Image: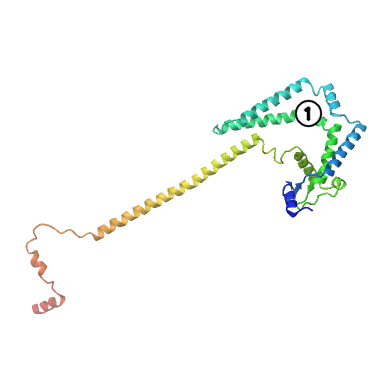
Amino acid sequence: MAKAEDVKEILDGRREFTLEMPEQETLTYYIANPSGEDIRKADWQYSKVYNQAIVDGFLTQTQMLDYLKDKGILDDEYTEELERVRTSLAAELFRLENILNESPNEEKESCALAVASLRDELFRLNQKINGPMGNTCENLAEDARTEFLTSRIIQEKDGERLWEDFATYREEENTPLTVKSRFEVMLWMQGLGSDFLENTPEQTVLREIAQARMDAILIDEEEKEIKPADEAEEVKKELSKASTEEISLDEAVVEAPKAKKRGRPKKGSAAKASAKPKTKKSQTKKKKSDD
């Protein structure tokens, strides 16, 4: 009997992927390892579809290649072009992966864009052949095997299978869910991550350069915001300093003692200073006596 910790380890070891729904809801599903029975039934599904494709008159991969050559689609010019792009892509990838960290961002960006352009060109050339090759007996059978495994190994968070059986999977009305699930299983079978397109060497370099530029812009904006604040603070300090100096100057004028007059006093100044001023009463008495 399986222990609880063993079940938890199996559930935690599953591969996770998400599906964005139109209602802005994000659904999470998991890819579990198939059982031996799942693999045997998937192989049987492959054989059944392959044989049916032969009966229905579909070409094998070898027959399709010969057909494309006879029609002039797969010719020497195409082969040379394909080899040229592959060689150029390998050379640019080597250059990008070995470029020095101290190299200017412009040089890194130029190399990364060159890799991205060559990768797109290679994809375009491959599509010229992959389209017809997708309708061969082998590819149709492989798609059937992938679909069967998808119906068996997609799980909910609690470990329950999303579809009860293969028929339930094929009757699923949520087309985005079945397409996304099959695509994730196909990547899982090839050992590729869900975000492998976002983590190519060129995309990684371009993302780092974009982040560096964004950081530089943010730092520049912060400095612009800080500089006026610093200038205002300096002006405030200068005004405060000037105000303090003005107050000190006023205090010095008020508190400074008056300077004494130097030189000899004028004659009679002492007597005038000592004489009392005549009051109003004395002036009245003098007036009456005169009368």
Q: Nearer the viewer, residue 261 or 54?
A: 54
State the image quarter where residue 53 is shown: top right
Question: Residue 45: where, in percent of width, then height?
Answer: 87, 39
Of the residues shown, which amino acid type is indicated by label 1?
Lys
Q: Which residue is found at the position 74% from the left and 30% from the top?
A: 124
As drawn, the residue found furthest toward the right would be 55
Q: Nearer the viewer, residue 203 or 235?
A: 203
Q: Is residue 21 visible?
A: no
Q: Nearer the viewer, residue 92 or 159?
A: 159
Q: Nearer the viewer, residue 22 or 278?
A: 22
State the image quarter where residue 217 is shown: top right
As drawn, the residue found furthest toward the top would be 76
34 with respect to 242 (left or right)? right
User: Which of the image's four quarters has the C terminus?
Assistant: bottom left
As drawn, the residue found furthest toward the front would be 1
Query: Compared with residue 240, is residue 61 higher up or lower down, i.e. above or below?
Result: above
Q: Secondary structure at mark 1?
A: helix
103 with respect to 75 (left or right)? left
Query: Compared with residue 228, is residue 60 higher up or lower down, i.e. above or below?
Result: above
Question: Residue 147: where, in percent of width, then height?
Answer: 83, 41
Query: Compared with residue 184, is residue 270 higher up or lower down, i.e. above or below?
Result: below
| Residue bearing the label numbered 1 | 128
Q: Which residue is found at the position 63% from the left and 37% from the top?
A: 204
Question: Residue 26: where, in percent of width, then height?
Answer: 73, 50
Question: Residue 33: where, in percent of width, then height?
Answer: 78, 44
Query: Compared with residue 262, is residue 171 higher up or lower down, i.e. above or below?
Result: above
Q: Which residue is found at the position 85% from the left and 36% from the top?
A: 141
Q: Which residue is found at the position 91% from the left and 32% from the top?
A: 54
Q: Is residue 88 visible?
A: yes
Mark 1 surroundings: few (<14), some (14-19) or many (≥20) residues within 10 A = few
